[in-house]
Amino acid sequence: MNAKFPVLPVAGGALARVLASVLAVVIHWIKEFARARRHRREANVLAGLDGRMLSDIGITRADLRDAFSEPFWDDPTAVLRERAIERRVNGALQKASEERAFRPLPTDRPARHSV
């Protein structure tokens, strides 16, 4: 009994799928590396700005140090964005609470001064 099984096409298809999945993983790693490098480059541009320009954006040198202390694959610009938004929100909340603060009613009487 001579049976001819199509072993090669089945094994070839499985091998092609394995190679395709390995290639997809490698391409994904290369894209992630390129993305991380691009974000680091953008953060380096921010690090080149002076303190006044950084404060206009809403970040400080300490924020930059914190962002660069993250691992390479983490996005440092995400940390900077969070800090800037946090400062903006806190500033708005502080301003709103100052507006609601107790203020004495204005009067026509002169202020008392102790000498």
Image (cartoon, helix red, strand yellow):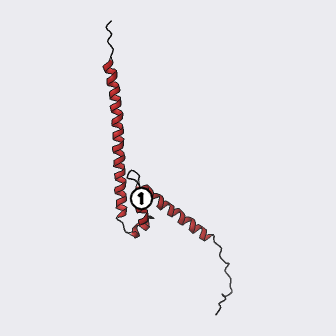
Q: Residues within 10 Å of mark 1 (few under 14, many from 20)?
A: many
Residue 53 versus residue 59: which sits nearer the camera?
59
**Left or right of 95 on screen, residue 20:** left
Identify the residue at horizontal 50%, vertical 64% (top origin).
87
Question: Farthest residue in the front direction?
Answer: 1
Quadrant containing the C terminus in the rendered view: bottom right
Q: Which residue is mark 1?
A: 67
Identify the residue at horizontal 65%, vertical 73% (top origin).
102
Residue 68 position within the rendered picture, expressed as x and y whole percent measured from the top left: 39, 58
Q: Amino acid at mark 1?
A: Ala
Residue 59 position within the rendered picture, expressed as x and y whole percent measured from the top left: 44, 64
**Left or right of 84 on screen, residue 42:** left
Give the quarter of the image for residue 28: top left
Residue 26 position within the rendered picture, expressed as x and y whole percent measured from the top left: 34, 40
Helix, strand or loop at mark 1: helix
**Left or right of 113 on screen, residue 58:** left
Identify the residue at horizontal 43%, vertical 67% (top origin).
55
Give the quarter of the image for residue 105: bottom right
Identify the residue at horizontal 30%, vertical 20% (top origin).
8
Question: Farthest residue in the top direction?
Answer: 1
Above-or-below relation of 58 to 76:
below
Residue 9 versus residue 50: which sits nearer the camera?
9
Above-or-below relation of 102 to 42:
below
Residue 40 position within the rendered picture, expressed as x and y whole percent measured from the top left: 36, 55
Above-or-below relation of 92 to 34:
below
**Left or right of 89 on screen, residue 69:** left
Residue 13 versus residue 104: which sits nearer the camera?
13
Number of numbered discs overlaid on the protein picture: 1
Quadrant containing the N terminus in the rendered view: top left
